[in-house]
Image: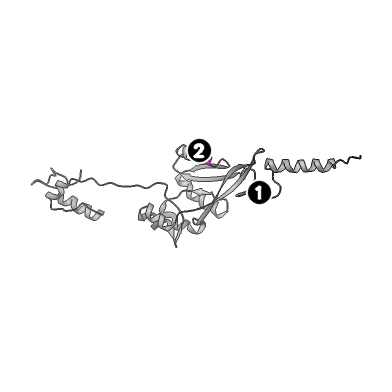
Amino acid sequence: MLKTFPNKKLIISLLILAFLATTGAKCGGLPAGAIKEGKPDPITLNYWKVFDEKSNFSDLIAQYTKANPHVTINYKTFTAVEYETELLNALAEDRGPDIFSIQTTWMKKYAPKIEPLPDKITTYSTFESGSIQKVIYTKANIKNTLTLRNINELYPAVVSDNQVISGKIYGLPLSLDTLALFYNRDLLNNAGITTPPTNWNEFNAQVNRLTKKDAAGNIPKPGLL
């Protein structure tokens, strides 16, 4: 009896296809959520500032680049005399920094030269796919940014007054200078003052009421210590 044998080339081809399927190799199309194979493209961000040395931001930069290893941040400082001139020239010549700090009162002057905060931003992360042969893929993550309501809830009104222009957010404060008022309730009560001051005019008026002078015009008991 004559035996027939299957085509060896066909068997080999079927084995290769089965192997590719079980190893998770790409056979047309990317895994769910991936936008490309490999790591995110390198990004370099230039940060310009005045007064603060790089050491003041080294920890913050290190934390960010650790979470986003494809990002490099170049930090550059300027003197107060040269900063605004350098910044305006760079923006006019389309070589301005990606991030820069200015005085909060300058924002309205700079607004026409910069873009406001978008409603959404895209960040990139990596993940591995494949049961045997691991392949790294890049994934895009779309996140909401701050809204005007967030600004009003998180910051004092002065931030919205200076950083929000025509309903758009153009900047965020790096820090805020705050003042605290300590007062002696008994002294205020003795002077007939029922509540502490809420503004500088009330403050000056109460200091004058609390200040005691003797016959010679000396002040044995000042209203402000």
Q: What residue is shown at x 59% (from left), y 45% (from top)?
A: 43
Q: Is residue 123 left or right of residue 9?
A: left
Q: Position of residue 141 (x, y in %)?
A: 55, 50
Q: Nearer the viewer, residue 82 or 68?
A: 68
Is residue 152 found inside the magenta-colored segment of the image?
no
The earlier-in-sequence mark between 1 and 2 is 1
The crowd level at tag 2 (other Cα within 10 Å; few <14, some 14-19, many 20+) is some
Q: Point out the frontmost of discs 1 and 2.
A: 1
Q: Position of residue 110 (x, y in %)?
A: 48, 56
Helix, strand or loop for disc 2: helix
Question: What amino acid does circle 2 point to?
Answer: Ala
- Residue 44, label in figure: none
Q: Which residues are magenta?
A: 62-69
Q: Nearer the viewer, residue 104 or 24?
A: 24
Write the residue at 44% across / 41% down: 52
Tell me where residue 80 sits by quadrant.
top left
Q: Which residue is at the front of the view, 38 or 92? A: 38
Given the image, on which type of amino acid does mark 1 rest? Leu
Q: CA distance from mark 1 to mark 2?
A: 32 Å
Which residue position is annotated with label 2? 62
Magenta span: predominant SS is: helix
Give residue 136's position: percent from left, percent from top.
63, 41
Q: Is residue 22 above or below residue 163?
A: above
Left-right relation of 169 to 139: left
Determine which residue is flagged by label 1.
30
Q: Residue 58, image x and y in percent?
A: 48, 38
